[in-house]
Image: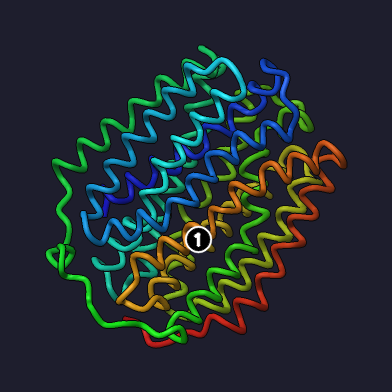
Amino acid sequence: MALISASHGLNHFYSLVPPMALPLFMSELGLSHYAAGLIVGAFGLSYALLQIPFGHASEGVGRKRIIAIGLLACSAGMALAGLSRDFWQLLIAHLLAGAGGATYHPAGISLVSDLFGRRKGEAMGYHQTGGAIGSFASPLLTGALMASHGWRAAFLAQSTYGVLMALILQLVLSEPAGDRRGSIPKSRASLRDFGPALALVAAATIYLLGYRGLMAFAPAFFVEKRGLDIAGSAVMFSALQVAGIFGGPICGRLSDAIGRGRLLAALIAVQSALLFAITASWGWGLLIALLLYGFSIFGILAIQDAFVTELAPMAMRGALLGFYVASNFLTSAIVPPLAGGMIDLWGYEAAFFALSSLTLAGIPILMLGAREGPRV
């Protein structure tokens, strides 16, 4: 579990390096918020679109191997970003890094589900803790490197982490015996069997809109609207992540006890209100809002990961998990340029208010479509 969670943490670590660099990209290259959003969106686009093929491939070639290959590709993209000199080079580098990151979630979630059975809610919580630790460490380390050595050196230095993790995975991690070629059940699933899982996927695509927008532009918001430098922005961005270290396992375990759907709906409403509160807060109020938001959003992510593995038909679980993650992260490609354009036109407050309002539309879809069944 520790090694899988560490790989998840590195995946999250890499996904937050580009947003930390956005204020520096805009300053050095003269980019608008919209253009900066396109760079973050490029990472999200390849990250989203390749989830399904990698999810399917993991059923045949092995989940450990898929994750290791992805780590190497993500490292290569980070290195190329560090060598980039203009907008288009950065765009291509982020497409490659996102493609590497796309390998993790279908394979990693499936591994955790197989290993922990009835305790998958709690297990997914600890799995999200790995992601939260990576998300917490990324702004601090990236911000420190960028403040002292510049963004190019930061990208180059951090490209080495994925290479090391890929080697450790290959040498240490053993997959469950059932995860071998030919072990996937051959039974067919009907369209009706996919209904609840697809309803959850649709709801998640909507209720994570605000989160994707905030992750793309929080560092720039702290610099432009709260007057922080890149190091101060890194500290605030880390505060957004740190509460997730506790939110994932606490909410995941609670969902094992009381059910996933209603708890998930309640957390969606809470995180929508907190996103609006972040744009209206300063000082300690901003810090508290960030901590509470991080707790709620990582709780949401842990519960939905456990929920989708229960709702997905076993016969096509790998491919469906790929579709689930792809749909979630497709918003990572769409929302950053959209939010950037809204910020250019109307400012941060109006853009984040619009996104926080839209997230609430996911609740009725979740409650009507994603029916809970017996735990396995």
Q: Position of residue 316 (x, y in %)?
A: 34, 72
Q: Which residue is drawn at 46% across and 72% down?
A: 254
Q: In which quarter of the image is the N terminus?
A: bottom left
Q: Residue at x 59, y 25 (%)?
A: 88
Q: Which residue is drawn at 42% across and 78% down?
A: 311
How many numbered marks, from 0 up?
Answer: 1
Q: Where is residue 96 in the image (x, y as percent from the top left)?
A: 44, 35
Q: Position of residue 152 (x, y in %)?
A: 50, 17
Q: Is residue 186 visible?
A: yes
Closer-to-camera residue (23/280) = 23
Say whether residue 84 is left or right of residue 222: left
Closer-to-camera residue (59/108) = 59
- Splitting the image into 4 quarters, where does residue 28 fall? top right
Picture layout, residue 140 above or below residue 54: above
Q: In which quarter of the image is the C terminus?
A: bottom left
Q: Residue placed farthest to the right in the image?
A: 346
Q: Which residue is drawn at 47% across and 46% down?
A: 47
Q: Identify the coloring.
A: rainbow
Say whether residue 154 is left or right of residue 296: left
What's the residue type where badge 1 is placed?
A: Leu
Q: Position of residue 192 (x, y in %)?
A: 46, 87
| Helix, strand or loop for disc 1 | helix
Crowding at dot 1, Cα within 10 Å, few <14 / some 14-19 / many 20+, comes out as: many
Q: Residue placed farthest to the top in the image?
A: 149
Picture layout, residue 50 above or below residue 184: above
- Splitting the image into 4 quarters, where does residue 205 fall? bottom right
Say whether residue 285 is left or right of residue 240: right
Q: Mark 1 points at which residue?
A: 301
